[in-house]
Image: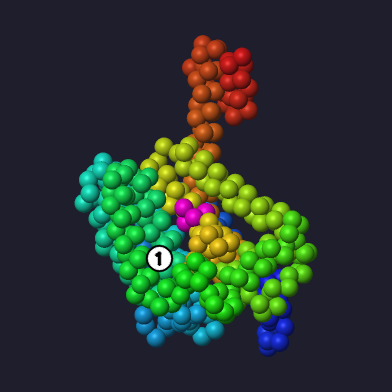
Amino acid sequence: MVLSSSSVENIGEFTGSYDLFIRQAIFAVVGFAVLFVLSRLGTDRLRSLAWPAILLAIFLLALVLTPLGHEVNGNQNWLKIGSFTAQPSEAAKLALALWAAAVLERKAKLVGQLKHSIVPVIFPVGAILLGLIMYGRDLGTAMVIMMIMAAVLFLAGTKLRYFLIAGGLGAVAAVVMALTSANRTVRIQAWLGNCEFPTEPCYQPDHGMFALASGGWWGVGLGQSRQKWSYIPEAENDFIFTILGEELGLAGTLLVIGLFAGLAIGLFRVARRSTSLFVRICTGGILIWIVGQAFINIAMVTGLLPVIGVPLPFISYGGSALTFVLAGIGVVLAFAREQRQEEEAAAGHAANTATTAASGSSVPPTTPVGAARAWKKARS
């Protein structure tokens, strides 16, 4: 989809039609390498990475405020060194899920108290992350960070009334932020349909809806989108779902939504089957991050939410986003792999016990195959 949505506008560029596609492919290779490495680590090793990860994320976000910071479409949330650019806020999402899980696991018996719910997840660490991100005017990423914080605190056992209070304060803060920013006010008015002329900020969401509508049931065909011919700004980024809907139709969009739903079910199963609070909280944070961000993006391009600039995980163009989403999946795969090993060890122990009881001997079977056969025989 990155190739299809970006190739037309890049025809006249010096780098050529395949530039963004090749870049995204390179980051995909890097992301899968990171995924593989993280999936081989144990839970204790991942827990030990929590503090270094969050400190590194804060440091990288602080670098955005220096001359190394780079502004893209009004948001200064990028680092640029030479021709290389990266978005530190993507690393902060994974780091927050890891770090908060490690901290809240240690404070499990105290999280019911307000001060232990706030310190240090919300203040000072969460406040520092949000402050650095909002300084760069990236409201979409700030929303995702707040979703992750809410998810980890909920899974840790924070009382519901604290969420109601925080929700009320958040609503007031959202209104204030909207009223004090001309750009956000215009976007909200565009979302409400208050557009007298077919220009920005109505231009992008309107043409996104045109793309989805023209896709019909089965789409106009892969690579055959008309709206990608410079009608939709950022077609390969935040609005890539509209190109997907135009080329693959309602069937393609429902398939993507179904895949995200399947991913959510898989992550939920890993969290539910674990006896470790760290695994549950971290997996829940990653689930809300990836699936919640996908929901925001799809709701945004279909008109259910104002345009706030959040990429679609796995699909939108962006090397930092793709790399760290794959890294998050690698962390959950590590949890799932350890669960499988524990279940196999428990089954082997049960087989040994059953065989010993059936034979009256204290000598366990010498091979796993023999143990499994003896266990099945004992069960029957």
**268 relative position to 7: left or right:** left
Q: Quadrant of residue 198?
A: bottom right
In-front residue for pair 370/238: 238
Q: Is residue 365 magenta?
A: no
Q: Residue at x 37, y 50 (%)?
A: 152
Find residue 33 and report its image quarter.
bottom right
Q: Quadrant of the C terminus?
A: top right
| Magenta part, dominant SS | helix
Q: Which residues are magenta?
A: 288-292
Location of residue 379 in the rendering, given as x and y in whole percent from the top left corner: 58, 16
**Does residue 291 show up magenta in the picture?**
yes
The image quadrant that residue 140 belongs to is: bottom left
Of residues 323 and 115, which is closer to you in this image? 115
| Residue 313 is at least partly visible in this image | no
Residue occupying image coordinates x 43% and y 52%: 285
Q: Residue at x 36, y 65 (%)?
A: 174
Q: Position of residue 282 (x, y in %)?
A: 42, 50
Query: Which one is in front, 35 or 175?
Result: 175
Q: State whether residue 157 is above or below residue 18.
A: above
Q: What residue is shown with label 1?
A: 142
Instruction: Say which residue appears at 41% left-offset and 56% top-offset.
Output: 147
Q: Nearer the viewer, residue 188 or 278?
A: 188
* Residue 298 higher or lower than 353, as above or below: below
Residue 172 locus on image (x, y percent): 31, 62
Indicate whether 100 appears above or below 58: above
Residue 325 in percent (x, y) is at 53, 60
Locate the N terminus by quadrant. bottom right
